[in-house]
Structure formats: structure tokens, C-alpha cells
Image: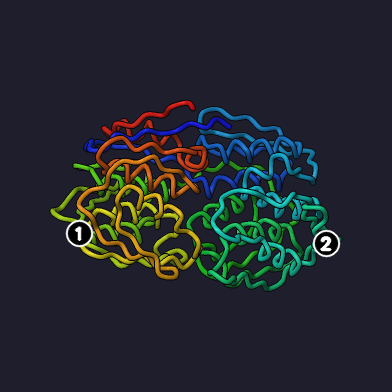
Amino acid sequence: MAMDKILVHGGATLQGSVRISGSKNSALPILAAALLTREPCIIHHVPDLSDINYMLQILSQLGAEVERASGTVTIKAENIKTHAPYDIVRKMRASVCVLGPLLGREKEATVALPGGCVIGDRPIDLHLKGFEALGAKVRVVGGDVKVFAAELRGTSISLRGKYGSTVLGTDNVMMAAVLAEGTTVIEAAAAEPEVVDLANFLNAMGARIEGAGTRRIIIEGVSELHGAEHEVIPDRIEAGTFLVAGAICGQGVTLRNVKPSHLESITERLKMAGFHLENTEKTITIKPNGGAKPLELTTEPYPGFPTDMQAQMCALLATSPGISTVTENIFPQRFMHLSEMKRMGADIKIEGSTAIIQGVEKLSAAPVMASDLRASAALVLAGLKAEGVTEINRVYHIDRGYEHIDEKLAELGARIERVKV
């Protein structure tokens, strides 16, 4: 893994438009869902990210034929294996989402316990609880999770967890249940747009799913699925990140290829903070509107404010006058970026799961270290506003979830470069 670093020269003004890529958190389970049929599936608008590359490697190792041409991936999983080995799985948590489709189609799956971001304990116990409710047995043997069943039967399953519902867990159980006998009802389901996107793809393959996007999803099992073609929704977290970049140092930044309805919790907060936003059906423009105001933010499951945007908002609030508070309800340990921002001169105190941010006039550049995907994006944003050159190390985190973020920011006028270490 190349240990690149990103250098951000502070003080540039952003202006212009940027095209938002397909959603990583939609594309990963949708690619996995292609395992549910022997027929070819064609998926458009797949972002070019290291996490996507790992998923395609896993699908190839499982025996699928995978072709990729500029944003379109074709997968034909005629004959598949049911064991995903550790050497690829360890690179990415989301690789657990092959469990559901393998269990659904082959009635068995073995996947090494995954790796990924270090943001606290993100167990897959809810996924496994869902599989057991469908009639599967679960064993953890030597670092592998094995699930197997003589048959899967529909039932009622609650996926309520300690910090709200689980998106990947909902995806996984939904993928296993589409080929189960009878009706499955998922209660306390995740309602995120990415879950709806997966359900739409599964329905295009012949599944019968209702209620995606609500807390209660009803799945009528079918005997088999066929191939389908699908376009992945735009990435609302990438879009939110560019909106914050436009708020921090923009003179009018337009996002193309977005679904404004998916971004309401973010755009509402930016309006409360004093920014002027305009949207059309597929674009959002953010403009400065006088001084920024402090905010009180709390992360919550969709449609609340997303935990995946918390770090980026901290970067904005660090230089917004007044006192802002940010409470992290989903992943309480997810404040590692704040100590790095403090190195840049931010005035932040942490009390329990709340960060208290006293806005400062300016940040100053410092060498900083990215600890996870969204933290790295936040440090890039902070660097846009800082005096001097901010050096961000370990940027492989950022490449897991942002397609060419340095190039896209440069197109808007940021002075940013990637350096091979």
C-alpha cells in the first residue's frame, strides 16, 4: 500500500462545480448482491476506490467473472465458492456483506472476520443474529465466521443495536432473506438511502421487498433471482464533504449529480450556520452569506445528521465564531481527528461523547495523521483554511472512500498535491 501524503496549501478560494461519484456504501453491498444469481449483472456509476477494488477481488476469488470499464462493472457469478479467505477480507470491514448472498444462494458461507477502520467496536453480531433467526447455524472457528442452513425460512427479526440500527446488517439479512421460504419482516431496519438502493437492485433482480427506507422491511421469498442492470445512487457523504469545503473557503461551489433529498440533514445545518444554499433536481450550490454561526449538532441514524459527516463539520466549526457543540451518538470513540485539529490551533474540549468547540480566527498548518476515512477528509478541509502547508499522512484511508478528492478539490481552485513517500 503506497504511503502517499497530501499537502494542502491554505488560503485558496474554491469556486466552480464538482461531479459527485457513486456511493461507496451502496456500491459495496450491490456488488455483493450479484452473487445471488447465475446471470450477469451490470452496475453503473461504481466509484474508483480501494474498498471497491477489494470487493471486486473478493468476488473474483469466490469464482465470479468480473469486468470493469470506467465506472461500469459487469459480474457473472455462474459457479461460486463459499469461502472468502482472510488475506483480502482483512483489508475491509464491508467484506462481511458477501455472507448474506452466499447464505441465501448456497445455504452456506465462510468469511474471515473483517478488518477496516478503527472507530471503536463494530461487531457483526446483529448480522449473525439475523441469519440465525432465518434458521442458519453460526460458528466462529479460527477467525472465520461460518454460517450454514439446511433451509432458510422467513420470520420476524429485530436488528435494534446499542447505537441504533445497522446498515450493513440490514443489507446482509435482506440479501439472505430474498431466497428464503416465506415472508421475512425486518424490524428496526436501517432506513438509509443506501439500503433503499440495494432493495431497488434486488427488486430489479426479481426479489419482492417492500418498506425499504422505513424501519420495517417486508420480504416475500422467491425461488430464484435473475440478472439486472442498475445505477448506484450518488455518494451523499462525499457530497456533504464538498458542501463543507464550499462553506469553509468557497465563493460559490456547485455539486453536480446529487440527490438533494438525501442531504437534507446536512444542508439544514449549513443553513442554520449562515450559508446560502440553492438546489435543483440534481445540483446543490453553496455560497457564503456573511459570517458563519456556531451550531449544536448531534449525530443520529438517517434521517438525522450522519456520523460520517461529524468530523468534517468539526473542521468548519473550528473557525466559526462562538461556541459549538458536537455530540457523537453512533460511534462514541469517533473523535480521533480532534487531537490532530488541536495541533493546528483549534480550541476543542471533549466531555464524554460531546466536543465543545470554541471557534478561533485561524488555524495554522501542521503535520497531521489520518486515523480513519472521514477524519482524513476533515483534516484536508481544515488544511484549506489553515495558514501555511498542512501535511496529511496515511492518506490511504481517504482513498477508501473518496474518488480522487485531491484532483476534485484542485479543479475547484484548492492548492493541493499528492506526494509519493
Q: Is residue 403 left or right of residue 320?
A: right
Spot occupied by residue 234 in the image (x, y as percentages of width and height): 43, 46
In the rendered image, is residue 45 in sight? no
Query: Which residue is disc 1 drawn over?
Result: 321
Please identify the quarter of the rendering in which residue 297 is found: bottom left
Q: Residue at x 59, y 72 (%)?
A: 160
Please identify the quarter of the rendering in which residue 347 is found: bottom left
Distance between the alpha carbons at the discs numbered 1 and 2: 60 Å
Amino acid found under the numbered disc labelled 2: Glu
Q: Is residue 86 left or right of residue 169?
A: right
Q: Residue furthest right?
A: 150
- Judge by depth and name the residue closer to the eye, 275 or 214: 275
Other residues around mark 2 within 10 Å, as few (<14) / some (14–19) / many (≥20): some
Q: Residue at x 41, y 34 (%)?
A: 6
- Judge by depth and name the residue closer to the eye, 158 or 327: 327
N-term mark: 1 or 2: 2
Query: Which residue is disc 2 drawn over?
Result: 151
For numbered disc 2, what is the local secondary structure? loop
Amino acid found under the numbered disc labelled 1: Pro
Image marks 1 and 2: residues in contact by CB distance under 8 Å: no
Spot occupied by residue 33 in the image (x, y as percentages of width and height): 65, 48
Disc 1 vs disc 2: which is toward the camera?
1
Q: How is the image coloured?
A: rainbow
- Judge by depth and name the residue closer to the eye, 198 or 207: 198
Q: Residue at x 68, y 64 (%)?
A: 125
Spot occupied by residue 150 in the image (x, y as percentages of width and height): 86, 61
Vertical placement of residue 413 versus 361, above or below: above
Which numbered marker is on residue 245? none
Q: Is residue 356 left or right of residue 69?
A: left
Q: Residue at x 29, y 31 (%)?
A: 415
Other residues around mark 1 within 10 Å, as few (<14) / some (14–19) / many (≥20): some
Specify the quadrant that holds the N terminus.
Answer: top right
